[in-house]
Image (cartoon, helix red, strand yellow):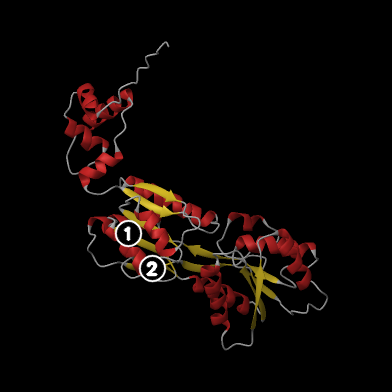
Amino acid sequence: MRSVMVQIPNTPTSADVARLAGVSRATVSYVLNNTSAVRISEPTRRRVREAARELGYVPHAAARSLRAGHSRMVLMPAPAIPVGPLYSGFLNELQWALGRLDYTVVQYGSVGLQGDEAARAWAELRPVAVLVPGAGLGPQGVHVLKRSGARAVVTLGPDRVEGAHALLMDHEAVGQCAGAHLYEGGRRRIGVVVPEEAGLEAYSRPRLAGVRQALKGTDATVTELPLAYTEEAAARLAARLAVPGRESGLDALFAYNDEYAMLLMRALQDEGVRIPQELAVIGADDLMLGRLLRPRLSTVHIELPSGRDLAELVDRAVRDPGGEPEVHRVLGASVVRRESS
């Protein structure tokens, strides 16, 4: 049987880069790991990067982690719920800011895993930090992550978790803004859309509670309106609301967010309901598409935390893992009044 010799190309090393650039291996490490503690001239940095590109050299993340005693990986579990443009923009800014600080952001899909079980799966990857959106992680999960080497655990949600840094997002304030706006506009029979999609309860229930709080002690009533995010479900709800004399008697809707508002507005208009004359509508998130509707959609503008500020919080926590967990209340809310209300 004839044998064929296959030559496997040698993987370039940092020593190869150092020889080509005419510098030490330490200098190569400092340049390619973006180390700022050592002063290296820009021409030298450029020479090292050019040599690395020419050879096709890529630093070995695992080896670097062994030398440093920890990785530079920041793990972000993928949200178990659909995320809109607002949250996507925030994530993009956060990933960019963490990259500037020499962290590698990895999104982890943990479908089917929840709470502490999910935390054990995250811990297997040995991240230096974990950013957990939403609810579900408990103190035991935080403990598991820290025992595995995570120097920072940061939660983004409505509640604080013992041992973790927290960005507390006050979705009740979103509902309060919407409810107060509708009441001030003379609306007294207000419906609040509550999405039926699993996982959105952590956001929709506080928003509903916020509307109730804004109208507490007034002559206004609040009606909960469950709605799936489908055209068929919106058509059914719109048909009920459009019955002559409208059994529900509603004169306003807070539609949870702009996407649900746009879905329901189209269905209401198909039923001949005049907006805002018969039914005022307000959403939340201030998406650009809401400005393209006719009538233009009133909304609650939501101010998410700065991705850069959160990246700096992660970096502080990684540098000082024994420090007291920081707690920040975020998520500013303000009404943008347009034609639909």
Residue at x 32% of width, y 55% of height: 129
- Residue under pointer 2: 138
Corner quadrant of residue 179 = bottom right
How far across and down, in percent of the image, does residue 331 sit?
45, 66
Considering only order in the chain, which callout, 1 or 2, is on the residue closer to the N terminus?
2
Discs 2, 1 touching: Cβ within 8 Å: no
How far across and down, in percent of the image, does residue 7 sit?
35, 17
Q: Which of 6 and 290 lies nearest the eye of the viewer?
A: 6
How far across and down, in percent of the image, does residue 140 sit?
34, 67
Q: Which of 336 and 207 lies nearest the eye of the viewer?
A: 207
Element under disc 2: loop
Relative to 290, is 25 on the left or the right? Answer: left
Residue at x 21% of width, y 46% of height: 68
Question: In what quadrant of the picture does the N terminus appear?
Answer: top left
Corner quadrant of residue 192 = bottom right
Relative to 46, is 230 on the left or the right? Answer: right
